[in-house]
Image: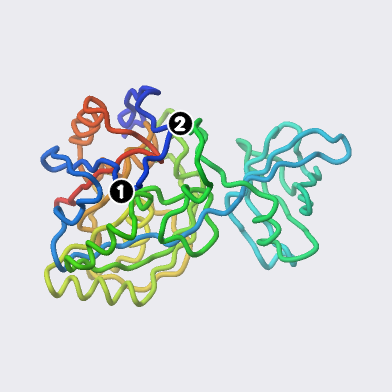
Amino acid sequence: MRTDLFDYELPASSIAQHAIEPRHDARLLVASNLSEVPFHRLATILEPGDLLVVNRTKVRAARLIGRRVPTGGKAEILLTKRVDPRYSDEGRWEALLRPAKKLGVGAVIECGAITAEVLSDPVEGVATVTLTTGGDIEEAIADAGELPLPPYFHGSLDSPERYQTMFAKTVGSSAAPTASLHFTQQVVDDLVAWGVEFAEVELLIGLDTFRPMTDGRVEDHRIHSERVIVGSDVVDAVERVRETGGRVVAVGTTVVRSLESAATSDGRIGTFEDETDLFIKPGYRFGVVDALITNFHAPRTSLIVMIAAVLNDRWRTVYDHALKEGFRFLSFGDAMFIEVVR
């Protein structure tokens, strides 16, 4: 499959540049019939006995602004993943560096109480660094860093917490699981009262998932691995919903990857705590997920490829409709509900 098959024209005016308040007032497009409901009426398209699975990850304040030693030139470090906590007391990190051409092996950057040393020459801006500080490194990052808002978002937020979901618990992601940004306590309470169950997985989101694919074949695009935890509580919840005839509804593409990484060869699900590089493409047979709540994604990304794996060629019809009807795209945009057809 050519990567250009997953391209489409996304006008700048369709990219959400402000966060709707309250969160649950976003629009929700039902892909099967192109109908629409406000997100706060999600219960009207779910059934008692359905299971909603969310990603409990929390975005790390991973954007560090500092100065190069000894020149004093400005430098930026965007931490994408902690790759080896055992390397030293502080650990090694994968990071996106700017200006990458001036930050080769041995470069030192001071970011407040944190000192970073570059261990590898950047490739497409990405390198390995070590971070040292006088105390706990995560606390130092939280103090010195900023939340890495998406590069296509040029608006402003009343609070950085608007880029965290209500389920956020475990610090470690470089981006938010944006499909969950629409949930409020009111929505959750309504769903629980309706008989919908919730479960939580953990996938630490890196930046690679959101990068456009280059020209060529989809099969040649490499997805970097991300850390996933699917616990026994999730396995039990999935088994219960299977027994009662309910659906497993993944909230976001990260949850789809998590659950499908935990799928077993006999069509069930098992616990999973490991790295995953699962790339879901058209032709993929879903083993766990029955439906998906997701935002509208950028052209030529692996996320669009996943949506095409669910909707097949109809993904273009759905996206064309969303653009025509003024749905808001990307991280702070509207949402879509898609059922998996087996």
What label sits on residue 24 in the rendered view?
1
**Residue bearing mark 2:** 214
Report x, y in % for residue 249: 24, 58
* Residue 321 percent coordinates (x, y): 20, 29
Lower sequence index among marks 1 and 2: 1
Please identify the quarter of the rendering in which residue 329 is found. Answer: top left
Q: Seen in the image, is 195 located left or right of residue 118? A: left
Q: What element carries label 1?
A: helix
- Residue at left 37%, top 40%? 20
- Separation of residues labelled 1 and 2 (CA atoms): 35 Å
Q: Quadrant of the C terminus?
A: bottom left
Which three-letter amino acid code belongs to the residue tagged 2? Thr
Inspect the image, locate mark 1, and give the three-letter code of the amino acid beneath it: His
Q: Where is residue 161 in the image (x, y as percent from the top left)?
A: 50, 51
Residue 328, x across and y down, in percent = 32, 33
Residue, x 39% and y 69% (percent of image)? Answer: 230
Q: Nearer the viewer, residue 291 or 308?
A: 291
- Decide: few, some or many residues near mark 2? Use Cα within 10 Å; few <14, some 14-19, many ≥20: some
Determine whether, in the image, residue 178 is placed left or right of residue 294: right
Residue drawn 46% across and 44% down?
222
Mark 1–mark 2 contact, CB under 8 Å?
no
Residue placed furthest toward the right? 70
Residue 171: image quadrant is bottom right
Relative to the observer, which residue lies in front, 319 or 156?
Answer: 156
Q: Is residue 125 left or right of residue 14?
A: right
Q: Which colour scheme is used?
A: rainbow
How crowded pointer 1 is (Cα within 10 Å; few <14, some 14-19, many 20+) is rated as many
Question: In the rendered image of this protein, does residue 174 appear above or below residue 11?
Answer: below
Q: Which element carries disc 2, helix, strand or loop?
A: loop
Q: In this view, does 18 lie to the left or right of 242?
A: right
Could you tell me which quadrant the N terminus lies in? top left
